[in-house]
Image (cartoon, helix red, strand yellow):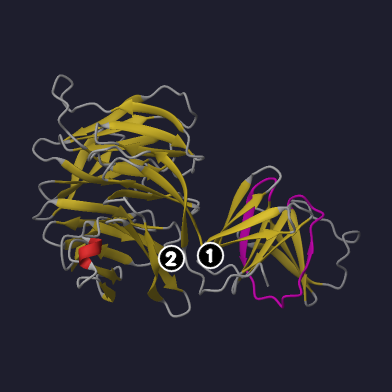
Amino acid sequence: NPTQVGWKAKMQLRHLKTLQPANDQISRITALCWSPNNRKLAAATADRVVHLFDEAGEKKDKFSTKPADAKGPKNYAVTGMAFSPDSTKLAVAQSDNIVFIYKLGLEWGEKKSICNKFLQSNAGVTCIAWPLEQPNEVVFGCTDGTVKVGILRSNKAQKLYAADFFAVSLCCGPDGRSVLSGHLDGSIYRFSFDENGPSQARIAVHTCVPTALSWGESVVAAGSDGKVVFYDVDGGVLQLFDYSGDQLAEIKEFTVSCFNPSGESVVLGAFNRLQVFNLNLQRRLWEEAGVKSVENLYSVTAMAWKPDGSRLTVGNLTGAVDTYDACLRRHRYKGKFEFTYVSPSQVIVKRLSTGTRIVLKSHFGYEVLRINIYQDQYLVAHTPETLLIGDLESCKLSEVPWRGSGTERFILDNPAVCMVYNAGELSLVEYGRNEILGSARTEHVSPHFISVRL
């Protein structure tokens, strides 16, 4: 079936567009991040300017960052950036001991202003992350090894925990409530904003400084020794891929890593190459999915994956910003729709006539096996354990537990409810609700005999 994707499909990266050309000298991209609503990409350059691009890759705005001391020299570097969960604010970490929060707004052209700043007395800020479920708390690491949280409501920073060594990397967990930090001695710490109180632990000591650290279905860490290690959330080693032999001369070192939004594919940046790994869903093992070699890419200094999973943006040592199309495969449906499988459990459905898109995602991480569209408006997708039903006009999606026969009949006459008839049982699913409203045994499935009112 052309609408089915097996677990053996591999993530493919295809160069799509150069958003910013390379310079003739070292001028590294120091940070990249996408807004959670997919509408803005921020790129920080070596001259401390933040460039803002729209989702099509067009540069729409830019602004110069400010030193911690308004009258002081501009001799700092932007060390990291992160958008707020609501996409209206941008946190900028700087080496001159400060984090600025810029209010950008949702629309282009809105007035920019600094709404928060977190000045540290004796330590530069080296990395930053903003967990999706913590809208008022931005986390950042410092040169003295401490990891702190900036609380927007009070405009004050608090220490979460202290390691003994420089924080080199920081990333958010897939639950939106956790972070990982990597330190100069190789240690990796996990912190969680638990409902029962925060928790913190040192989970692992990596084989080298974990400059490339990220968290998806597993935790991945890599650095200058060429060893890529996948850990579980408690620090147990799941798999190790060793490139420390003859390949290290080509790779030089792994500088940054980035998971796709589903956490089932990860890309590690090195010298002139992007190394891809996929999670084999059937065997629950990570597998090498190939290398994207790019001549004159030099060292990758920043990466960011678009939240809908369709694009990977890469910044390098010479100031270039490139975007890559990222998908497992692409399929056209009846000449009217395009299905882009960005992971086994996530598909972007695009209407070709208008370009409008909706992201179809199994919130339980199940593989999307089959997709159909009825009346050019209603979307029905099957996973091994659930049924996904959506209205492309209202963009409302539902995922309900389902073990059907594969011969279900879908009655779509009601604009708010889908009626599903299977083996003598009628089930009602309201668009936008992840539960079955009700079920009844009946042979009368004609819409002339049944009405639904909510």
> Could you say whether the residue bearing mark 1 is in a helix, strand or loop?
loop
Q: Residues within 10 Å of mark 2 (few under 14, many from 20)?
A: many
**Which range is magenta?**
392-416
The part of the image, by quadrant, that contains residue 74 is top left
The part of the image, by quadrant, that contains residue 92 is top left
220 vs 398, nearest the viewer: 220
> Could you say whether the residue bearing mark 2 is in a helix, strand or loop?
loop
Which residue corresponds to the image point at 10% horizontal and 47% vertical from the top-left? 144
Q: Who comes first in sequence, dot 2 or dot 1?
A: 2
Q: Point out residue 89 in the picture as x, y percentages from the top left corner.
A: 38, 34
Above-or-below relation of 308 to 59: below
Q: Main secondary structure of the magenta part?
A: loop
Apparent side of residue 368 relative to residue 112 in the rendered image (left or right):
right
442 vs 277, nearest the viewer: 277
Give, as a three-letter code, the residue at label 1: Ser
Which residue corresponds to the image point at 76% horizontal and 75% vertical from the top-left? 407
Q: Are marks 2 and 1 in contact (CB under 8 Å)?
A: yes
Q: Which residue is mark 2?
A: 264
Q: Point out residue 321 in the picture as x, y percentages from the top left corner.
A: 37, 43
Q: Point out residue 296 in the picture as x, y percentages from the top left corner.
A: 31, 50
